[in-house]
Amino acid sequence: MEHAVISREDWVEARKALLVREKEATRLRDAVNRERLALPWVKVEADYRFATPQGEKSLSDLFDGRSQLMTYHFMLGPDWDAGCPGCSFLADHLDGALVHLNNHDVTLTCVSRAPLDKIEAYKRRMGWQFPWVSSFGSDFNFDFGVSFTPEQLAAGPVTYNFRELPADQAHDELPGTSSFYKDDSGQIFHTYSSYARGGEEMIGTLMILDQAPLGRNESSTMNFVKRHDEYAPSPAAASSCCH
């Protein structure tokens, strides 16, 4: 993209015009957030079970003493060798948020269909600390619209992100978040789910890049992303004398 080079005074006027649009976007986001909080809830009746490093746990157990639970549906299938690069990119942002979420009565847990030993091995490779459990053998990921059987994929379109997705665009695992509330009597309610690009707001790096001179500089959504241990050393790091 070619950019005009103008005087500081003219730049300030252009920036002020953009600020009007930014404020409109902020107000719209606030309004959408209010509508999200006003959504009706659905009572969770199924007895979902998860494998964790502390043994088998129920969905209720995953709340870890808090009233709110957010699950990130991390794309790591039973026969996958490594986690999805995009999900891994998002997961790089979670550990620093945990103390703040926990002190705001929110537990955040990743859930994948891979067996626990495969999850634990990939978690060690990436150096992450956040909770991550296995729903292997459970209908959890299927019920919340992020996992699909070979039969479903062969039969035609699947339902993902509340719409039909052609089978050739779908995969056995897809990303998303699902949120739950547990009341004083122990009843659990599904309050919200988000899919596809809905998770972008959890990725601080993207928000920073949006303000960089070249933005995200991508030819397709997040095509520049790799697992954090797969990037080549940066030129600055390679030339540094401090090794």
Image (cartoon, rainbow, N blue to C red):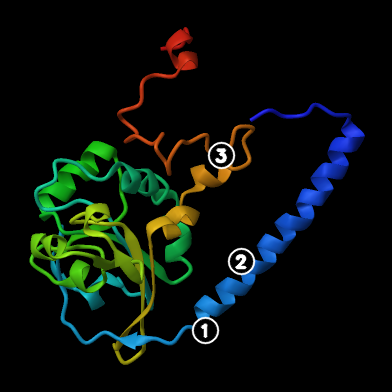
Which residue matches tag 1? Answer: 38
Q: Dot 3: what SS?
A: helix
Mark 1 to mark 2: distance in Å?
14 Å
Kindly identify which residue carries mark 2. 29
In the figure, is residue 158 to the left or right of 136? Answer: right
Task: Name the residue located 35 percent from the left edge and 71 percent from the top edge.
Answer: 162
Label 1: state its secondary structure: loop
Q: Name the one closer to the observer, 122 or 208.
A: 208
Q: 32 or 49, which is in the foreground?
A: 32
Q: Determine the image quadrant of residue 183.
A: bottom left
Amino acid under label 1?
Ala
- Residue 12 image point, x, y percent: 86, 40
Whether residues under marks 1 and 2 lie with C-beta atoms below 8 angstroms apart, the answer is no
Residue 35 placement: quadrant: bottom right
In the depicted structure, whether residue 145 falls above or below residue 14 = below
Q: Where is residue 110 in the image (x, y as percent from the top left)?
A: 28, 58
Q: Find disc 3 in the rendering and name its residue.
A: 209
Q: Which residue lies furthest to the right in this view?
A: 9
Q: Quadrant of the C terminus?
A: top left
Badge 1 or badge 3: first in the primary sequence: 1
Q: Position of residue 27 (x, y in %)?
A: 69, 67
Which badge, 3 or 2, is on the more N-terminal residue? Answer: 2
Most foreground residue, 71 or 85: 85
- Outermost residue to the bottom: 185
Mark 3 residue type: Leu
Q: Residues within 10 Å of mark 1 (few under 14, many from 20)?
A: few
Alpha carbon distance from label 1 to label 3: 31 Å
Residue 137 drawn at (x, y percent): 8, 66
Q: In this view, does 130 lie above or below 38?
A: above
Comes first in the chain, label 1 or label 2 = 2
Residue 161 or 53: which is nearer the viewer?
161
Quadrant of image for the N terminus: top right
